[in-house]
Amino acid sequence: MPHPDLLFPADPRQREITRELYAHVRDLPLISPHGHIDPRLLADDEPFDDPAHLFVVPDHYLTRMLYSQGVHPDALGVPRRDGSTAAVEPREIWRTFAAHWHLFRGTPSKLWLEQTLDGVFGVTAPLSADTADEIYDAVAGCLARPEFRPRALFERFNIEVLATTESPLDPLTQHAKLAADGWGDRVVSTFRPDDVVDMEFGGLTGAAGTQAWRQRVAKLGEITGEDTLTFTGYLAALRQRRAAFLAMGTTSSDHGHPTARTLVLPEPEKRELFERGLRDEATPADAEAFRAVMLVEFARMSIDDGMVMQLHPGSVRNHNTWLHGAYGTDVGGDIPQATDYVNGLAPLLSEHGNDPSLRLVLYTLDETTFTRELAPLAGGYAALYLGAPWWFLDSPEAMRRFREAVTETAGFANTAGFVDDTRAFCSIPVRHDIARRVDAGFLARLVAEHRLTLDEAAETAADIAYHQPKRIFKVVSE
């Protein structure tokens, strides 16, 4: 079992208060409104394959670190871009991983995995080359039992709502199956239109990028029956797909653009950008301008249909070109970059930032923006909320820095609660628990400094862990 005071402050008085606050939130249900679990996992409810494919192969947090220290992705079973994989047994993947476990000292990955092995699978032995087979067999034995199938774990994890993420081109077959099984209000989709908006999606630029984009836009037209070779038909098709997602229980959209730039243009200029893409004439500047235009269009759609809008810019996708070329996207080749929110969002906020019908949740990979940009923006516009630290920042230290940086200006009410943003299903409860522990510690300091009463801190702890994400992401009706 983890130490009961894991991540609690060292100061005895603050630690005592943290224990009491954490007790208020420890057993609250989990709201997971932003994540990347494959819905097929819960729709099919089949047993997990093996420990290596459960923990190592799909987790770019782990494979990225190992690759940085010379472990080839083939040795970890990472699928190649062409769909093939190296002939390596799952147990060998696990042994390689365990032999390099020391590389993760001090990282959130170490914390997540150790707590998952202990809390979910009852494994308390330290992971190492010597214990690799013992732990592999223990986890594999658990995975063969019905209580470790995905839906049973979902119940055990006390997940109230979990959001997956799908493209407008996804037929939502898995979500239809979940709905038919009575799970439609517990596992919902998130509308993620990047692939039909970004002319450089997947790292392709120039004509190669626009040709692939044009094919996806054409498929969007086939799905909806709209003429997506016109800008008007393209927007109509997106609205139609949003309506289909909403009918399946979706409450939010998600936009992962390289920057936070938004742009308001006259209709003819928007059409010309779109048509240049269709003609394979779009420059990188055109692609960026079209993404910026579409963020404003999606804000308008959100005002009309009520979807919460999430924006997480700031990642240079596929920076490691060899890794991308050999293994594709989402394998650890992305790098954060500085992001300008104040100027980037100004056009959108000038148009819609004071509309109470818009709800825009902002994330960042650039901590320098917490105090300088994001907190003042969220504290100054009714439409804005701050998303939790995510991806490169989803560590206990960054979570503490987030609270310290934004609370004085934005308060707690302008933050949207924790999101686990994970593909690793079994780590969901651990990630939420860590966030609750860190927030309890931060609030305990405010109590110890006589800035909050204990009752105020306890109420706030429950709000940011549970009540605010439900309300802000519209998981339940208001």
Image (spheres, rainbow, N blue to C red):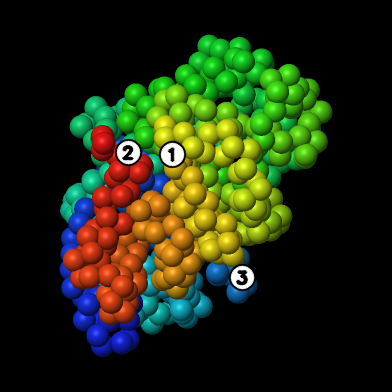
- Dot 2, how many residues are within 10 Å of its Cα: few (below 14), some (14-19), or many (20+)? some
- Residue 117, by quadrant, is bottom left
Q: Amino acid at mark 1?
A: Arg
| Comparing labels 2 and 1, the label whose residue is closer to the camera | 1
CB within 8 Å, label 2 to label 1? yes
- Dot 3, how many residues are within 10 Å of its Cα: few (below 14), some (14-19), or many (20+)? few
- Left or right of residue 179: residue 321: right
Residue 255 visible to an observer of this rendering: yes
Residue, disc 1: 359
Q: Earlier in the sequence, mark 2 or mark 1?
A: 1
Q: What label sits on residue 333 in the rendered view?
A: none
* Quadrant assignment for the C terminus: top left
Q: Residue shown at 61%/51% (left/top)?
A: 341
Q: Amino acid at mark 2?
A: Lys
Observer-nearest of 206 and 308: 308
Q: Earlier in the sequence, mark 2 or mark 3?
A: 3
| Badge 2 element | loop
Residue 89, image x and y in percent? 45, 61
Q: Residue shown at 45%/73% (left/top)?
A: 397
* Quadrant assignment for the N terminus: bottom left
State how far apart marks 2 and 3 are (Cα): 40 Å
Q: Residue shown at 49%/21% (left/top)?
A: 239
Residue, disc 2: 474
- Left or right of residue 59: residue 39: left
Residue, disc 3: 68
Residue 396, image x and y in percent? 41, 71
- Left or right of residue 307: residue 260: right
- Left or right of residue 6: residue 289: right
| Badge 1 element | loop
Q: Is residue 428 above or below residue 132?
A: above
State how far apart marks 1 and 3 are (Cα): 39 Å
